Image (tube, helix red, strand yellow):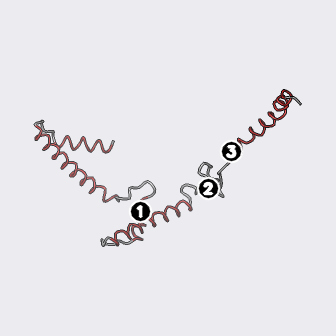
Amino acid sequence: MDFGTVIWIVVLVIAPIAAVLFGGAFGVLDQLGRGGLALDDAPRPGPHGAAGPRPGGALDRAEREAEIRQLVKARHERQTARGEQPFDVESEVQRLLALGPEGDPDATQDEKGRLDDELRVEVRQLAIARNERRIARGEPPLDVDEEVERQLDGLQG
């Protein structure tokens, strides 16, 4: 067999076989390294066809309560370790559960007015301090009341 015949056999017989095998290997290469813990995979649906509990359902409420309880216990343990006054975990959990998912955990309805007043006082102190710095630089002072309202409007908007 001469060299030209060998080249034609390789090109006509072996090259198509190699191309088919090489093309089929791409699917294998995409799956290489994947397992049950792969992060690229979509979450598998649960028994009810969803990735998690149904919003507002019993499982969702139970999960929310468990997470809140865990966070409150951790905060209680940190405060106790620092020597601060401990608080009642159960009453704090019940207070946070009563707020609902969209509630502000730092303020109840009767505390919001007091917090608004405290915020206004703090913003006023900052405006006064800013005016003192402006006067020290030789700039004209701002109206404190107008500055307080502007800052509070910026916080709300």
Q: Earlier in the sequence, mark 2 or mark 3?
A: 3
Distance, label 2 to label 1, CA atoms, is 34 Å
Q: Quadrant of residue 99 in the image?
A: bottom left
Q: Quadrant of residue 87 in the image?
A: bottom left
Rendered location of residue 37, percent (x, y)? 61, 56
Residue type, label 2: Leu
Q: Is residue 45 above or below residue 29?
A: below
- Say the numbered circle drawn on residue 115: none
Identify the element where label 1 is drawn: helix
Rendered location of residue 62, percent (x, y)? 53, 64
Distance, label 3 to label 1, CA atoms, is 50 Å
Distance, label 2 to label 3, CA atoms, is 17 Å
Rendered location of residue 92, percent (x, y)? 39, 67
Residue type, label 1: Leu
Question: Residue at the location (14% across, 43% down)?
Answer: 133
Q: Which residue is mark 2?
A: 37
* 95 sits to left or right of 11: left
Question: Residue at the location (28% across, 42% down)?
Answer: 153
Q: Nearer the viewer, mark 3 or mark 1?
A: 3
Q: How many marks?
A: 3
Q: Earlier in the sequence, mark 2 or mark 1?
A: 2
* 107 sits to left or right of 23: left
Identify the element where label 3 is drawn: helix
Identify the element where label 2 is drawn: loop
Residue type, label 3: Leu
Rendered location of residue 105, percent (x, y)? 38, 59
From the viewer's side, name the closer residue of 17 and 103. 17
Q: Which residue is mark 3?
A: 29
- Say the numbered circle drawn on residue 96: 1
